[in-house]
Image: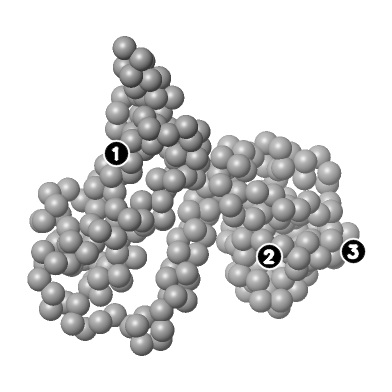
Amino acid sequence: MLKVLLVDDEAPILNNLNKVIPWNDLGMEVIGLARSGIEALSIAEEHDPDLVLCDIRMPVMDGLTFITKLRESGSDAEIFLLTGYQEFEYAREAIKLRVKDYISKPIHYFELQDRIREIGEEIRKKHVKEKYFNSVSLIDSVPDPDSVKKPPEQLMMIALDYINTNLGADLGIEELSDHLGISSSYFCLLFKNHVGITFVEYLTKQRMEAAKFLLTNSDKNIAQIGAFVGYHERRYFTKVFQKATGMTPSEFREVCSSSKAL
C-alpha cells in the first residue's frame, strides 16, 4: 500500500479528503492528517509518505515552507498542492520544489480521485525500477551489449517468461526492453511479430486468465485477486475484466460456482 499524508488547516476539507477518496480501492492508506506544516513534518519524518496532499496557506508553517523542509530531509514524495491561490510566485516556488500538480479549491473529488490513481501508478512503476536497479550491481545494471546478439526467438522466450512470472507487478514496455537489453521500439516490433498481438494485449490477456483461475479455484476476495494480477483499484479491475469476459468478476465466480454444483 502506498502511504498518503493529508495536510490542511481546514478540518472539513481534511476530513473530506480522508473519507471521500476511496484510498483502499486505490491501493493506498492515509498514514496521517495534519493541520499545520510543523505537524505534517513530524508525521512525514516518522512514516516517509509516498504522496502528500498539502494546502499552501496554513498557520505556524505554510505549505511551501513545509515542502521545502520535506525536500531538505531527502523525501522524494509526490506532492499535490491544494490551493485557491493562483499567483505566479506560488507556481514558481512549487516548480523549484518539484510539486507534481495543483488542486484548486473548491475541490472536485472525482477529478482528484482520477489524478490520484494516475500518480499512484507512476509511483509504483518508480518503485519497481528502484527495486530492480538496487538489486543488481553497477556492472550488471548496464545493459549487456551481447543481448542484442541473442536470436529474436530467445529474446521473446525470456520476455514471456518474465511477464508470466511478474503479472502482479506494474510491467511496462520500458522495463521489459531494459530487462532484455534492447530498445523499446525493437522490443515492440519483435513482440508483435512473434506473439501476434501487442505487449499490452498479451499482458491483459494473461492477467485475465490468471484472474479467472483464481476466481474459480480460490477464496480470495475480488480486490485481492485484482491486486494479485496487477490491478490495485477494484473498480478498474472490474472494468477490464468485464470488457474481456462480458461479466464482472463476481458474476464470473457465481457462474463457475453454479457449474461446479451441478
Foreground: disc 2 or disc 1 = 1
The residue at which mark 1 appears reads as 209
Horizontal side, residue 234 vs residue 75: left or right: left
Q: Given the current orientation, which residue lies at the most extreme front position?
A: 261
Which residue is at a point 61% across and 70% down the rendered structure image? Answer: 76
Q: What residue type is labelled 3?
A: Val
The residue at which mark 3 appears reads as 60
Quadrant of image for the C terminus: top left
- 135 up-or-down from 13: above or below: below
Foreground: disc 3 or disc 1 = 1
- 168 up-or-down from 73: above or below: above
Foreground: disc 2 or disc 3 = 2
SS at mark 3 in the image: loop
Which badge, 2 or 3, comes first in the chain's sequence? 2
Quadrant assignment, res 141: bottom left
Which badge, 2 or 1, comes first in the chain's sequence? 2
The residue at which mark 2 appears reads as 48
Image color mode: one colour
Q: Given the current orientation, which residue lies at the most extreme top position?
A: 262
Where residue 5 appears, as percent x and y from the top left, is 71, 55
Which residue is at a point 18% across and 61% down the rendered structure image? Answer: 157
Q: Which amino acid does label 2 sit on?
A: Asp
